Amino acid sequence: MDIIKKKIERIIITGYLEEYKQANTYCREHGFRVIQTNPCLSDKKHRGRVTSFEIVAEKDKSAT
C-alpha cells in the first residue's frame, strides 16, 4: 500500500444561479479543480425551486 501526503487548498463558493459561470471561471483561472457542485433550495415560498448554488473546489498546494 502506498500513502501519498499532499497539502490541499479547498474553497467553497456559494451564490445565486446568475453568478455560477463567474464562480466556475474563478476556479479555472486560479488553478482550482471543481470536485462538487450542489444546487441549493433556498426559495421558502416555492420549496422545490433552486435559486442558488455551492461549488467545492481544490488545488494541490504541495507542488508550490
Image (tube, rainbow, N blue to C red):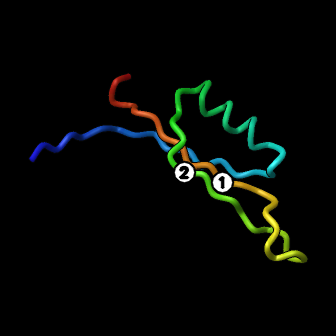
Label 1 residue SS? strand
Q: Nearer the viewer, residue 59 or 40?
A: 40
The label number, if any, that marks residue 10 in the structure image? none
Does residue 13 appear to the left or right of 6 in the view shown? right
Residue indicated by mark 1: 54
Q: Position of residue 16 (x, y in %)?
A: 81, 52
Q: Residue at x 24, y 40 (%)?
A: 5
Does residue 30 appear to the left or right of 22 in the view shown? left
Please tell me whether residue 31 is drawn above or below residue 20 in the rendered image: above
Number of marks: 2
Please tell me whether residue 16 is drawn above or below residue 27 in the rendered image: below
Label 2 residue SS? strand
Residue indicated by mark 2: 36
**Of the residues shown, which amino acid type is indicated by label 1?**
Glu
Q: Position of residue 64 (x, y in %)?
A: 38, 22
For the residue carrying disc 2, how many other residues have a C-alpha within 10 Å: few (<14), some (14-19), or many (20+)? few
Q: Residue at x 84, y 70 (%)?
A: 43
Q: Nearer the viewer, residue 21 or 64?
A: 21
